[in-house]
Image (cartoon, rainbow, N blue to C red):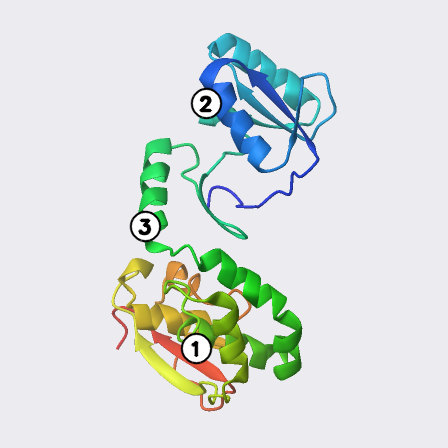
């Protein structure tokens, strides 16, 4: 991973913007959408965007700003960037950022257009309805593990984010429905390659839901990276005998 993706809250905060013409105007529109206050080079700020066309002028501006400890994005100059600006899919409050580390803005744009077509306009209202129901969700499932399992199951079923919903009604109906027993037990998966994109949708979902992942040493780290971030990971030579919750045992490619 070449960069750490973060979402910055810029509402009311100063951001330096240098340059002229359409390149500057495009960055100004983006900053204004985020609620940032655009300021000049001599003002105090933690971030700066340099949209200057001439190479020597852009490089000099970046050097001056970095000397003040300011993180800089230089338009169309990835080697000078401390951070890059992704292509954005906006389903407020859901934001999806697509970055290529400055390798190809065109590729990021093409991916954004594909993802835009996949996501219904009700995705944002669904997120809002889930946020509004946080108190009710905690009351129904007081334990964090139970709550996570219930939400995971809902988002694969009645609250599928890729299906249009009447968001508030769908969340209310889910909260009123009887509980389904959470998945438990040990699932053994044989990994066919080191490429995580070769996982089936069912396998990827299991990795995203498992409480613990046991794996043979042959399993590639890229596969393990698809597991839930807070799930335990243990390298073992054979499936475990005792487990709790939902566990996976991944048998590596080429293992006997």
Specify whether residue 142 is in view: no
Residue farthest along the right direction in this orientation: 44
Up-down relation of residue 44 to residue 252 (above or below):
above
For the residue labelled by badge 3, is the local secondary structure a helix, a strand or a loop? helix
Position of the C terminus by quadrant: bottom left
Residue at image location 41% in from the left, 60% down from the top: 221
Q: Label 2: how many residues lie within 10 Å, few (<14), some (14-19) or many (20+)?
A: some
Residue at image location 28% in from the left, 73% down from the top: 255
Residue receiving disc 1: 236
**Earlier-in-chain disc, 2 versus 1:** 2
Specify whether residue 52 is in view: yes
**Earlier-in-chain disc, 3 versus 1:** 3
For the residue labelled by badge 2, is the local secondary structure a helix, a strand or a loop? loop
Give the distance between the C-alpha atoms of the residues marked 3 and 1, in whole angstroms: 42 Å
Residue 159 picture location, percent across and down: 44, 71
Determine which of the numbered discs, if any, sits on residue 117 in the image: 3
Q: Tell which of 233 and 238 is nearer to you.
A: 233
Residue receiving disc 2: 77
Residue at image location 49% in from the left, 35% down from the top: 85
Give the distance between the C-alpha atoms of the residues marked 2 and 1, in whole angstroms: 46 Å
CB within 8 Å, label 3 to label 2: no
Residue 152 picture location, percent across and down: 47, 73
Up-down relation of residue 62 to residue 36 (above or below):
above
Give the distance between the C-alpha atoms of the residues marked 3 and 2, in whole angstroms: 30 Å
Residue 253 picture location, percent across and down: 27, 68
């Amino acid at each position: 991973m070449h960069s750490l993706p973060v979402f910055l809250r810029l509402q009311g905060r100063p951001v330096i913007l240098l340059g002229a013409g359409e390149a500057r105007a495009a960055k100004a529109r983006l900053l204004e959408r985020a609620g940032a206050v655009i300021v000049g080079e001599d003002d105090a700020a933690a971030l700066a965007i340099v949209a200057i066309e001439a190479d020597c002028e852009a490089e000099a501006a970046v050097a001056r700003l970095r000397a003040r400890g300011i993180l800089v994005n230089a338009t169309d100059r990835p080697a000078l960037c401390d951070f890059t600006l992704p292509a954005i899919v906006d389903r407020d409050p859901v934001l999806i950022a697509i970055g290529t580390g400055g390798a190809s803005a065109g590729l990021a744009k093409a991916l954004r257009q594909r993802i835009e077509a996949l996501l219904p306009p009700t995705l944002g209202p669904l997120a809002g309805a889930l946020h509004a129901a946080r108190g009710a969700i905690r009351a129904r499932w007081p334990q964090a593990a139970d709550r996570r399992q219930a939400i995971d199951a809902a988002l694969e079923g009645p609250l599928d984010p890729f299906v249009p919903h009447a968001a508030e009604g769908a969340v209310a109906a889910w909260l009123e429905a009887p509980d389904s027993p959470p998945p438990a037990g040990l699932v053994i998966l044989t990994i066919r390659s080191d490429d995580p994109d070769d996982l089936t949708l069912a396998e990827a979902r299991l990795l995203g839901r498992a409480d613990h992942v046991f794996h043979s040493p042959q399993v590639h780290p890229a596969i393990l990276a698809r597991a839930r971030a807070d799930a335990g990971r243990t390298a073992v030579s054979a499936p475990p005998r005792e487990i709790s919750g939902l566990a996976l045992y991944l048998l590596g490619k080429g293992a006997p």
